[in-house]
Amino acid sequence: MKLGSLVFFLFILVLFSCGRQEAGLPPPNIVWITSEDNSKHYLELFDEDGVETPNIEMLAEEGVIFRHAFSNAPVCSVARSTLISGTYSPRTGAQFHRKISKVPLPDSLNMFPAYLKEAGYYTANNSKEDYNFIKNEGVWDESSKTATYRNRRTGQPFFYVHNLGVSHESGLHFTAEQMDTTTTGSPAKASKVFPNHPETELFKFTNSFYRDKIQEMDRQVGAVVSQLKEDNLLDSTIIFYFGDHGGVLPGSKGYLYETGVHIPLVVYIPTAYRESVSLPIGSSQDGFVSFIDFGPTVLNLAGIQVPDQMDGIPFLGAGVSAEQLSHRQLTFSYADRFDEKYDMVRAVRKGKFKYIRNYQPFNFDGLMNNYRYKMLAYQQWDSLYRADALNPVQSAFFETKPPEMLYDLDQDPHETNNLATSLEYQNQLSDMREQLDQWVKGMPDLSFYPEHFLIENAFENPVAFGRAHQNDIAKYIRTSNLALSPFKEVRKELRESLSSQDPWERYWALIGCSTFGVEAGELLPYIEKASLEDSELINRARAAEYLGLTGQGNPVAVITEALYASEQPAEALLILNSIILMQSANYQFRFQLEPEKIATLVKENAEVQRRLEFLAANIL
């Protein structure tokens, strides 16, 4: 026996003797098959309007279906940062997509495959990473488009990630000519349109065309499983199939609705490992699991201690029973910047109820995002709104949101009937509001500071910064929540916050005024003063934004000058978000920017360039 093989064999014996695996069993191989951009709504296994996915269904027959699995974030880099770390992104500074600045992992935490690698696993990723974190050393043995578990040593256990891109959003960037010449193969039900979408031929085609992508994705899942079978590995390999977040029809990817975060998850369990999993094979489990839990679950299955720095807990393996899993009925999710579009939304789902907190509700869902609007369906949806050809449910995507939303998902799976103002549901609303508040305070949630401030002051060690400023963040949360009370009850506090020495208390007071709208008009002298004198450029822009939102003034000069004065790309990008909002169809203020007045460092940023390109092409 060669020395390397002998050392590895001895390692396995030590692993057994430490009790980290069931007696007589080697550590399992673990494979993740991840499909991009698809929520659970497109697979018949999970939804009556989905299509057949026979290969995934075959895995389910020999495994477990998780009917309530969630990605925590509705977009690639943030969701994948959550997966690879087992942590909530707003706590660790990894919540912005696309990254302007990467952040380190907290408190000596490693990306979880590094712990597998240390324990003797071969780790391979084919091929997408897309992390907002600075990657640790020793995470992957291979990470590339050609990475494979086949390069491991003989008998070495492996963790292998196989990404399938066929269902990605870009697959729906077809042209009108392609639509006219393409016949979809999915069944008639596949063209069913969501209730918040216009029921047009384009939307019907987009639905059906996308489900064709799902069926091709399923065929590719089958190819990966066939390779494992060919290599005589099915009996020793636990296989996860899941979507990397929701999407990709309009209003899904990038949004905290169920179509953005509720993913399909199936785990195949080979016979030898079924006793250690403790869940009935072929069963459907209703307990809630989230991306924060996936890394801890893999470590648990491999017999490796889960680091304390992770936020998630295992849902398979030692110490996890079906009864325990059934009691898991809570999940949190988050949405911040997506490419060049800013918003800040948090959500909690508890059982059948979903609570969404829109912290900046004037940033309506349909605000221009260049990549989203490459899709013809997005373009048509916007055009029909401008033509006043949509009903109220379909129009909501392009209008100011309520600060709070509450949905009964059993009765309203597409989240179209907001119960937040219903007297019948006030106790439920209050309970879930408190649940969310405790979560954002407990992390604490770094997004209560603007991104540019975090880049400059927090991103060397975001978690330590959060701990040091937890009381300040709690203060900003309280200020933001003033918008949830009747104005007459909080106007004094808002006025005091507008005059605070703390710029970020002023920031949230201004956002609160914009949430109240014209009702906050008695505070106009404070807001006008902020638009001209505040020490923070973004506060001047926020104050001017209030004037534009309420029609009490023209915001163009103040916001434009703030943009020209900014030397930080993320700050300028946030100001540009206000410009796009003010120039939208709902407000129609006219901005004619002079690019030569914008700082060079700002103009070099790719997200800023997208905003400037759109503005140059869409001068009113």
Image (cartoon, grey):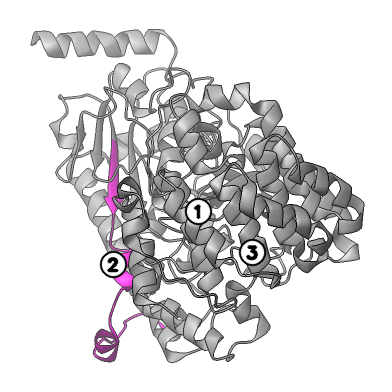
Residue 379 visible = yes
The amino acid on which the numbered mark 1 sits, given as a three-letter code, is: Ala
Question: Within 10 Å of the Cα at label 2, are there few (<14), some (14-19), or many (20+) other Cα atoms?
Answer: some
Question: In the rendering, at what x and y percent does residue 29 appear?
Answer: 31, 32
Quarter occupied by residue 518:
bottom right
Q: Residue 442's spot in the image, x, y percent?
A: 68, 31
**Do the numbered discs 2 and 3 sit on residues whose CB atoms are within 8 Å?**
no
Q: Mark 1 = which residue? A: 562
Q: In which quarter of the image is residue 521?
A: bottom right
- The C terminus: image quadrant: bottom left
Asked if disc 1 and disc 2 are in contact, CB closer than 8 Å, the reply is: no
- Number of numbered discs on residues: 3
- Of the residues shown, which amino acid type is indicated by label 2? Glu
| Amino acid identity at mark 3 | Phe
Magenta span contains residue 115: no
Mark 2 or 3: in front is 3
Above or below 304: residue 591? below
What residue sits right under mark 2 in the picture? 216
Q: Name the residue under label 3.
A: 362
- Front-lying residue, 555 or 421: 555
